[in-house]
Image (tube, rainbow, N blue to C red):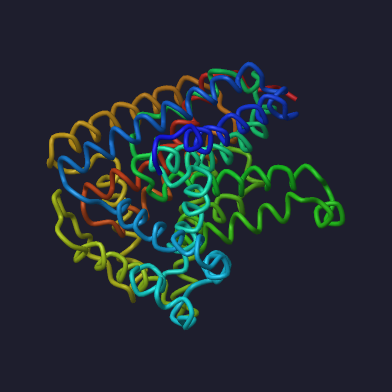
Amino acid sequence: MGNSWLDFIGLFLPLFLFLWWTRRAKWGKEIAPTVYYLWAILLLKTAVGMIYLEWHHRTFGVCDSDAYLRTIQIFNGALPHHIGHYLQFLFYPGGEYLPPDLWYYIKHTRFWSDKGMMLFIKVLSICSLLGGGKVVWIMFWYNVVGMLGPVYLLKRVTPYFDSKLNGRWLLVFLIPQVLFWGSGLHKEGFIISMQCFVIGAFIDMAQLGSWKRIFKNAALYTFLLAWSVLLLIRGFDAVVIALVLVLYLVRSWQVLLYSFALLIAALLVSDWLNLGVGNFLVQKQQAYLHNGVVVSVQQVLALDGHSVWSFVRNIPMALLFSLVGMPGLVLETVYFVFQLICVSLLVVLLIRHTSSIWIWRFISIALLQLTFIGWVVTNQGSVVRYASIPWFWLGLSMICLSLRVKRK
C-alpha cells in the first residue's frame, strides 16, 4: 500500500473504532479508567514487538514469523481475484487432503498439513485484513487477541480479592518476557489468551450451580471452544489446564502436590491403555533436537516412551532446566538469572502471605507447563520462548500475593 490519505484512513480507522468501542462498551465503563492503561499497553507491546522483530532480523536473520507472514500474503492474495478461495482457506480445517482449486496457494506453504498451525495462521490472516497487511498493525491486532483472554479472566478472579480490576492487576501484562509482548507474532500470546478463556469460563460455570443452568449458559460453549483450540494448537497446555481444573474442589496449597500426582496417574493410565503419550513426547523431543540450526545450549533428558518412570524421575531435571537453564548465550543467561530471582521472590512471598487458592492453582499450572517444557524442548533458546506462557501464570500469582484475599 502507498502513503495516500486513503491508506492512512484504512489503517487507522479500525484502531479508532476499537478504542471507541472499548470506551463505550459496558465492560469498558466498568473498568474505567483501566481501559486507558489497556490501550497504552497494547501500543507498548506492539512497539516492543516491532523492535524485537527488527533486532532478531539483524542478529539471527529470518525467523518463524517471516514464514507466517509469507503464508498470510499467499492466502490473502486470493482476495482480490477469488474471494471463494480465501473463504475456503479460512474455513477448511486443513490436513493432508488438498482441494484442487487451492493447490496454487497451498504448494507455497509448509504449514497446510499442521491443523494447529493453520488455525493460528488463520487468526493472523484476519489480523492482517484488519491491519491492511502492514506488519505493525498485524502485530497490534494480534496483541488485541492476546489481551482479550487475560481481561476476561481477571474480571472473574478479582472478586476473590479486596481489589477491583485496576492498574495493579494490569501489571500482569508487563511481565518482562519480550516474546509475550508481541515478539514477532509467535503463538504464545494466543495460547495464553485461550487458557484464560478456559479458566474464566470454568469459573462462570462453577458459579451457576446446576447442570441445567450450565447448559443454557454461554460459558460452557466458551469453555469447550477455547479448550478445543488449545488442544489443537499445543496439546500439553490443554492437558495441564484440565489437570488443574479437575482438582477444583481441592481448596488448599495441596493442589500443587495433587496436580503432579494426577499428571503421573495420567501417564500411567496412558501407558496401561497403550495411548502412546510417552512415545509422542519422545518424538516431540527428538523433533526439537533435530530442528534446524541451534544457536543455544542443548539439553536432552533420557526419556523412554515405554517407561513412565523415565518421565517421573526426570521431573526435577525438567524443572531445573526450564527454571534455571544452563550457561549459554549472554541474553539467555541474563533471562534465567532474572527468572531465578523472581521465583525466589515468589517463594518468599508465599512463606509470608496467607494466600488464596487461586494463587496455588496458577502456580500449579505454571510448574506443570515448565515440566512439559523441560521434558520436550531441548535447546535453551526455545525454552525462553515457551516459558513465556508459565511466566504469565507466575506473574499473575505474584500480583495476587500483593493483594488481600476477600474473606467470605
Residue 44 sits in quarter: top left
Write the residue at 54% across / 52% down: 241
Residue 355 sits in quarter: top right
Residue 169 in picture, x, y percent from top left: 55, 23
Residue 168 in picture, x, y percent from top left: 53, 18
| In this picture, residue 223 sits left or right of residue 112 | right
Residue 320 sits in quarter: top left
Rendered-image quadrant of the C terminus: top right
Write the residue at 50% across / 65% down: 81
Which of 330/53 is in front? Answer: 53
| In this picture, residue 360 sits left or right of residue 310 | right
| In this picture, residue 109 sits left or right of residue 337 | right
Q: Is residue 25 above or below residue 109?
A: above
Tell me, yes or no, if residue 180 can be seen here.
no
Tell me, yes or no, if residue 317 can be seen here.
yes
Residue 34 in picture, x, y percent from top left: 60, 20
Q: Is residue 76 above or below residue 384?
A: below
Rendered-image quadrant of the N terminus: top left
Write the residue at 44% across / 22% down: 349
Q: Is residue 175 above or below residue 313?
A: above
Residue 229 in picture, x, y percent from top left: 55, 59
**Count of numbered tags:** 0
Q: Can you name the residue that lies furthest to the right here?
A: 212
